[in-house]
Image (cartoon, helix red, strand yellow):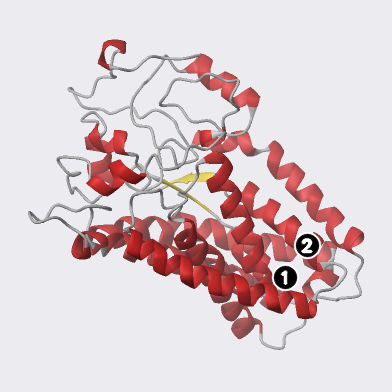
Amino acid sequence: MHIPDGYLSPSTCATLYAAACASWYAALKRIKRSIGGRTIPLISVFAAFCFVVMMFNIPLPGGTTGHAVGVAVAAIVLGPWASVLALSITITIQALFFGDGGITTLGANCFNMAVVGSFVAYGVYRLIAARSDVSSQRRTIAAAIAGYVAINASALLASVEFGIQPLLFHDSTGTPLYAPYPLRVAIPAMMIGHLTFAGLAEAVLSAGMIAYLQHANVGLLRQSQSASASTSTSRLWWVIAVLMLLTPLGILAAGTAWGEWTARDLANSHASPVIEAASKSQLPPGSVPAGIERLSTIWTAPFPAYAPTFIKLPSDIRCRPCLVSACVRCCRWQAPPFFASAGSRTREPYQLHRENAQPLRASDGESARI
């Protein structure tokens, strides 16, 4: 759901930036009025929590991947307004430092996941939990449903934003200028994976975290302003630390998220079968859309694809922020130089089972840098 640069038109980006900015302004005003001793530390904790959660990718139908967001847990504990800020901080860091999502599309990504996701999750949770006791199992079930509905609401918005681009923005010949796939392709391609695996992952994560807090720190669920920031967040930091140690598991899911292909991916004939399979048998465009080619290089992240700058990887391998797993991947794969996507978090090389899908050679303009 991290839309890269070039997939949305400037007018679409401006509209969604305006919506996101209005939400940020309202959130800051709300937080300023109701700020407590634990509010700022908790925002930072949940920004870190959501960042780590998004590192775990899940294989989805069609050879793509997806991930949980953690938005329901943030909205339940912090409330929707503080959750908007926590998720927005996470998404901004991902875009600026790691190239995960675009700069021009930052407003869209924050609006989809942070704003809509937070309010949908919080609304569904409050509706189902009602006046039940804070330690009741009903709250756990409410959290699971809230997470499931929220991530799918965010995915649906992203798919609509993708799908309206070729309808509204094309040249005189009808060639799309930005995202190339229409609504009839974008919505099923995005939603099938999120309605199944990614949505279930978000539900399990949300229910698990709320059940954990019910036993470990029920005060957070009561949103007690008198709770000490240090005692309220200490166990959460341990949870984040454990998740960080498990991030190498995120490399096990081969593939890239749907709609996060770079201009180079779209121009690569060897990647076309993979894109076609992920897009409901719809062939990728014959040429790279002009908007994607023009805007995809508008920002170069200092740590693209979460790889430290001192690790010289093959240009088509993107690693998680784990030096050990990065080294393992460099040794395991023999310079497989096709199908990269600068905005995606998993970068296992695709093994296309087609006779004509051979890796590019160094003579094709690719050089393995290790």
Identify the residue at horizontal 86%, vertical 62% (top origin).
232
Residue under numbered circle 1: 78
- Left or right: 246, with 258 as reference point: right
Circles 1 and 2, Cβ within 8 Å, touching? The answer is: yes
Q: Residues within 10 Å of mark 1 (few under 14, many from 20)?
A: many
Rendered view: 72 above or below 142: above
Q: Nearer the viewer, residue 336 or 108?
A: 108
Q: Position of residue 357 (x, y in %)?
A: 22, 24
Q: CA distance from mark 1 to mark 2?
A: 7 Å
Q: Position of residue 141 (x, y in %)?
A: 62, 72
Q: Give residue 27's mark.
A: none
Rendered view: 149 above or below 63: below
Q: Nearer the viewer, residue 180 or 58?
A: 180
Q: Could you tell me which secondary element the residue under label 2 belongs to?
A: helix
- Amino acid found under the numbered disc labelled 1: Leu
Rendered view: 18 above or below 165: below
- Left or right: 287, with 138 as reference point: left
Locate the N terminus by quadrant: bottom left
Q: Could you tell me which secondary element the residue under label 1 belongs to?
A: helix
Identify the residue at horizontal 58%, vertical 41% (top origin).
97
Badge 1 or badge 2: first in the primary sequence: 2
- Amino acid found under the numbered disc labelled 2: Leu
Answer yes or no: is residue 167 visible.
Answer: yes
Identify the residue at horizontal 30%, vertical 46% (top origin).
292
Residue under numbered circle 2: 42
Extreme residue toward the top, this view? 363
Extreme residue toward the left, this view? 173
- Left or right: 258, with 313 as reference point: left
Answer yes or no: is residue 73 visible.
Answer: no
